Image: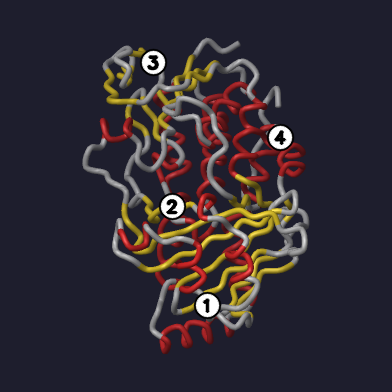
Amino acid sequence: MDQRHFTIIGGGIAGLSTAIALERSGLCATVFEAASEMRPVGAGLGLAANAIKAFEALGLKRELLSAGHALNGLAILDPKGRTITTTEGLGGPGTEQCTIHRADLHALLLNALRTTPVHLGKRVVSVTQDGTKATVQFDDSTVHSAEHLIVADGVRSAARSSILPHVKPRYAGYTCWRGVIHAPDLRLHRATETWGPQGRFGIVPLSNERIYWFATVNSDERNERYRAYRIRDLVRHFAGYHEPIAGILARTTDAELLWNDIHDLEPLDRFAFGRILLIGDAAHATTPNMGQGACQAIEDAVVLAAVLRDEPDVTKAFRHFEHARRTRTKWITETSWRLGRVAQWEHPLATRSRNALFRMLPDAINKAQLKRITDVRFEGLAGG
């Protein structure tokens, strides 16, 4: 067993995936999570082929595909349900994609941990470091000394704020509602996203006859009117959009409705700071327009374990990780930001022109972008 020990701040997708990857590589870790209990939270998410390849390196591909729902295609539609652009034929070698409820993914990751302890109710107040250790101060007045510290506590990372106090989440210009319903009669085999002047509406099939939906609307940040929106308001807002949008909304209760503004991080110049490394959303949070937030967090875990396997000096390994990940995550963050801005256009003339342009784009362009996202390779981790 490698004697190096790692402290991980954050028990979400990035933190737990990293803990698993380190375990599989014979490394020891401890996870500290701010929440006082691991409760099922969130809605659905998509995992593209790059994330599935990373899960294969972790030895968890079979478990993931069993818990998730295979996705055969994605279509962007206009409010009348007409196709703007589509990506079909997913699921072949190297192009497998699946959707999964965030709570199911979290449970899968927790169950995959073998020896790593997870301490709950440990909310970070500050982080410092010297030549021998990193020191974490928690809000319960306890202090933890870390040999090496991996920061994975999300876009609003308190740990990152100690290192980069000037870095704040960047508001994308639109707000989002989400929900999950049970709909055995809606047998969907592909995901759809409808773009129109009133905003976007996404419909994503999940396992166990569930559907995850989301709706995004242009707004100023922390809009109190939208905060107060209930299902009836969304039904009225998207009244001109095609079915089954109204029907899906009608099956969602107000108690099940989730709402939040959309943020990312403007790409950082650094992830590595001596004994401290930023990963996941704490390092490169992205808007959800390319479905790559969770995927990139899982990639981080596998890449970090690989560089630690090859480089015994952890500070050097952290810099190698930064070099390996910064360009790719920057491209994804910036591309997703631009895509979101275009998808949220409201002016009728602009939206008609956009839709016409997308319809004329050769299929090769869509495939080239998909290939840039998914054409990655990961070596299996020992012990997976």
Residue 82 is situated, as x and y percent measured from the top left of the image, at 63, 82
Q: Is residue 97 left or right of residue 22?
A: right
**Marks 1 and 2: which is nearer the front?**
1
- Which picture quadrant has residue 212? bottom right
Point out the residue furthest to the left here: 166
Rate crowding at label 2 as few (under 14), some (14 to 19) or many (20 or more) other CA atoms within 10 Å: many
- Which picture quadrant has residue 84? bottom right
Amino acid type of the residue tagged 1 in the rendering:
Ala
Amino acid type of the residue tagged 3 in the rendering:
Ala
- Label 3, on which residue? 146
Q: Residue at x 30, y 56 (%)?
A: 222
Residue 60, disc: 4
Residue 117 is situated, as x and y percent measured from the top left of the image, at 54, 16
Relative to 197, residue 10 above or below: above
The N terminus lies in which quarter of the figure? Answer: top right
Mark 3 / mark 4, whichever is N-terminal:
4
Rate crowding at label 4 as few (under 14), some (14 to 19) or many (20 or more) other CA atoms within 10 Å: some
Residue at mark 1 to residue at mark 4: CA–CA distance: 42 Å
Q: Residue at x 61, y 62 (%)?
A: 370
Q: Residue at x 38, y 83 (%)?
A: 347
Relative to 196, residue 291 above or below: above
- Label 1, on which residue? 239
